[in-house]
Image (cartoon, coloured by chain):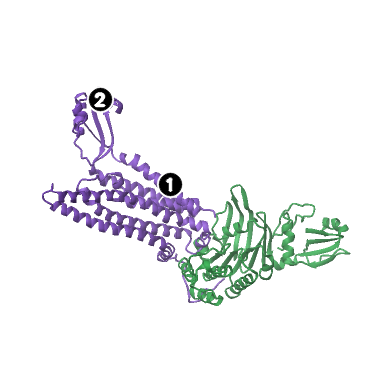
């Protein structure tokens, strides 16, 4: 067989170093990574500028005397404008993780399988397992880290609104974007995309499947799962005594005998209330009136103090899910009969 | 050392067997031609040999016993898949750099020199190269890995005659200079005749012929004689295939020695590789394998017995 005497020939029996595979990963995915960097970079710049503006606006408002003057009222309405813009913006940011999953995760293996280049990549000296593990691990780490850094910046940007008590930290559209959740959702989106690509083997269907799966998972979490991370606290009566920014997960009425009362029953009872009660601005008035008739309103709520507990529960299961999906992807590559 | 060794190797896709009961020992140091009609299982066999496909049954080892697809095997086998898949959006130079980083053994100077000699611009994207240049680039990437075994799946299918000639010349140069073993599948018989010294014919997922070309050619000849006597001779000789043309019949027969008597009134000719392959492909029941092989005797099929060269 071939004599390996030429000095130009490198290598021996040791495996291909990770750093070489890292270069391959970078060379093949640098446009995707640049795209993610440009997207997050652009959004970060916006957050930075707006964050500074909002801070100076609240500082001016705090320094404004007397607070009831027309000038101060104008400042306050300006700040309300910042707040509503921020709320719209958070809606936009929800989709960034799924974009990563669809554009970074799904094509990763699907494109190799679709164009046939896997026959090149998987027959090189490094072997397909090392190739797959390096690529998945490096890209997952890079994207997760970028998402985490971005969510730290977002938390800074949004902090003045929390400080003003305008939003609860457990509010669904804000919870996802802060703490460890944003990074975890990004990682999950990438893992879903990678597995879909390996299983479906075609880029566009894999993108569609990962989009649908991620959206379904996100919706199910927000609507059904998250509220059960910890048993909600219960409050009732006219003065329930929990913060307005707590996350109310359900509310209901009970009748005089303690039996559940439907909304219709409450409406019927309320028809007998005097006009002063019916037209009262403060809902506590109606509740007090109902209380005199032994109708009680109940709330199940999650207090804001559970934010980090919930963050780590959600981050934890998403991390576990992502690891399972990535393992399944590696297993599919290993097992795949071309 | 055997380049590829299979025992009872089989691969089933859904319900159909792409390859079945394949037992082969392909010795190293040869240029092996793997021929057969479309769907015969050529690609499946090669994919299993390079570890891309896992067998449904049996086992395959390469280069003296390494399991196919193991790190040691991958390190010493270079594979150029059908249509020479490379990353089309990478410049040729980056393609080399990529392959260099994916392999333990790599000869960068050889790769660059070869591309320069071939006139393939290093800065041009792979997708912008001609079909022949892409095939040559894929071959360069494979050879720069300094493999002990080079596996080529239908390397000539997409190439024009000139590119075919150049491609095969490159392969033969590597064989002469590096002593690399080569196995290539193709249905372009004419191209293989000049280069291959070992032949495997696959048909309908089964190995029909396997042996050194020289021995195969020596072990077969064509007898031409009157059609009226054909049936009589077919009873007594090991006939692979019979073609009748008017009053004459052409029989491809197996001979055990060069001195086999020619029946009176008949003429004997040496057989060419292409003629031999075509004769076997026309008779899927016939086989020429090392060792005893049972075949179904049809009206004009070969006989059960000890076929072909040992």
How crowded is the residue under tag 2: few (<14 C-alpha within 10 Å), some, or many (20+)? few
Q: Is residue A177 left or right of residue B201?
A: left
User: What chain is the green one?
Assistant: B
Residue B180 higher or lower than A336, as above or below: below
Sequence-wise, the earlier of marks 2 and 1 is 1
Q: Position of residue B180 (x, y in %)?
A: 58, 70
Q: Residue at x 63, y 69 (%)?
A: B164
Q: Is residue A261 left or right of residue B154?
A: left
Q: Secondary structure at mark 1?
A: helix
User: What chain is the purple one?
Assistant: A
Q: Position of residue B266 (x, y in %)?
A: 86, 64
Q: How many numbered marks does the figure carry? A: 2
Instruction: Specify the quadrant of the image occupied by residue A22.
Output: bottom left
Marks 2, 1: nearer the viewer: 2
Name the residue carrying label 1. Answer: A212
Q: Is residue B252 left or right of residue A27?
A: right
Residue B7 higher or lower than B169, as above or below: above
Instruction: Specify the quadrant of the image occupied by residue B50.
Output: bottom right
Instruction: Tell me the quadrant of the picture where the N terminus of chain B can be found.
Output: bottom right
Residue B238 visible in the snapshot: no
Instruction: Tell me the quadrant of the picture where the C terminus of chain B can be found.
Output: bottom right
Name the residue carrying label 2. Answer: A271
Residue at mark 1: chain: A
Residue B273 visible in the snapshot: yes
How crowded is the residue under tag 1: few (<14 C-alpha within 10 Å), some, or many (20+)? some
Residue at mark 2: chain: A
Same chain for marks 2 and 1? yes
Q: Which is more toward the observer, A133 or A258?
A: A258
Q: Which is more toward the observer, A333 or B61?
A: A333
């Amino acid at each position: 067989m071939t004599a390996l005497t030429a000095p130009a020939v490198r290598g021996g029996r040791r495996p291909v170093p990770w750093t070489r595979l890292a270069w391959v990963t970078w060379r093949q995915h640098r446009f995707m990574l640049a795209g993610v960097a440009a997207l997050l970079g652009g959004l970060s710049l916006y957050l930075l500028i707006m964050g500074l503006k909002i801070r100076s606006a609240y500082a001016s408002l705090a320094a404004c005397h007397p607070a009831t003057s027309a000038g101060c009222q104008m400042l306050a309405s300006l700040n309300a404008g910042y707040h509503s813009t921020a709320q719209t913006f958070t809606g936009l940011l929800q989709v960034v993780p799924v974009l990563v999953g669809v554009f970074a995760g799904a094509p990763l293996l699907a494109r190799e399988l679709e164009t046939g280049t896997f026959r090149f990549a998987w027959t090189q000296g490094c072997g397909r397992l090392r190739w797959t593990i390096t690529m998945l691990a490096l890209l997952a780490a890079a994207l997760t880290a970028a998402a985490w850094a971005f969510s730290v910046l977002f938390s800074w940007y949004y902090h003045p609104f929390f400080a003003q008590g305008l939003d609860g930290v457990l509010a669904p559209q804000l919870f996802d974007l802060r703490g460890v959740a944003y990074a975890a959702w990004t990682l999950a989106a990438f893992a879903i995309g990678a597995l879909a690509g390996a299983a479906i083997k075609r880029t566009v269907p894999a993108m569609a499947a990962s989009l649908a799966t991620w959206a379904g998972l996100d919706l199910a979490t927000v609507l059904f799962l998250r509220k059960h991370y910890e048993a909600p606290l219960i409050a009732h009566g006219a003065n329930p005594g929990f913060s307005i920014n707590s996350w109310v997960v359900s509310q209901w009425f009970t009748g005089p005998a303690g039996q559940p009362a439907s909304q219709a029953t409450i409406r019927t009872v309320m028809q007998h209330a005097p006009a002063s009660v019916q037209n009262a601005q403060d809902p506590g008035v109606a509740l007090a009136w109902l209380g005199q008739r032994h109708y009680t309103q109940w709330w199940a709520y999650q207090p804001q103090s559970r934010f980090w507990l919930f963050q780590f529960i959600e981050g934890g299961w998403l991390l576990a899910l992502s690891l399972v999906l990535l393992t399944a992807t590696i297993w599919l590559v290993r097992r795949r009969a071309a | 050392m055997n380049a590829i060794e299979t025992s009872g190797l089989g691969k089933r896709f859904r319900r159909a067997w792409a390859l079945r009961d394949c037992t082969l020992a392909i010795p190293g140091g040869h240029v092996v031609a793997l021929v057969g009609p479309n769907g015969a299982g050529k690609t499946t066999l090669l994919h299993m040999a390079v570890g891309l496909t896992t067998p449904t049954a049996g086992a395959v080892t390469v280069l003296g016993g390494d399991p196919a697809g193991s790190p040691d095997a991958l390190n010493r086998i270079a594979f150029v898949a059908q249509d020479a898949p490379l990353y089309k959006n990478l410049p040729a130079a980056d393609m080399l750099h990529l392959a260099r980083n994916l392999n333990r053994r790599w000869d960068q100077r050889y790769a660059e020199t070869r591309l320069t000699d071939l006139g393939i611009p290093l800065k041009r994207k792979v997708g912008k190269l001609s079909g022949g240049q892409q095939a040559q680039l894929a071959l360069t990437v494979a050879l720069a890995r300094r493999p002990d075994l080079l596996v080529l799946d239908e390397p000539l299918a997409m190439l024009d005659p000139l590119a075919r000639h150049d491609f095969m010349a490159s392969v033969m140069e590597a064989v002469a200079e590096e002593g690399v073993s080569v196995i290539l599948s193709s249905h372009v018989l004419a191209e293989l005749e000049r280069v291959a010294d070992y032949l495997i014919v696959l048909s309908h997922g089964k190995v029909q012929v396997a042996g050194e070309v020289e021995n195969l050619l020596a072990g077969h000849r064509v007898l031409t004689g009157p059609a009226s006597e054909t049936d009589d001779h077919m009873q007594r000789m090991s006939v692979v295939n019979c073609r009748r043309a008017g009053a004459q019949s052409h029989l491809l027969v197996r001979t055990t020695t060069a001195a086999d008597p020619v029946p009176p009134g008949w003429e004997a000719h040496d057989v060419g590789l292409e003629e031999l392959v075509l004769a076997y492909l026309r008779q899927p029941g016939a086989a020429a394998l090392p060792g005893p092989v049972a075949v179904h005797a049809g009206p004009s099929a070969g006989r059960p017995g000890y076929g072909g060269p040992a």
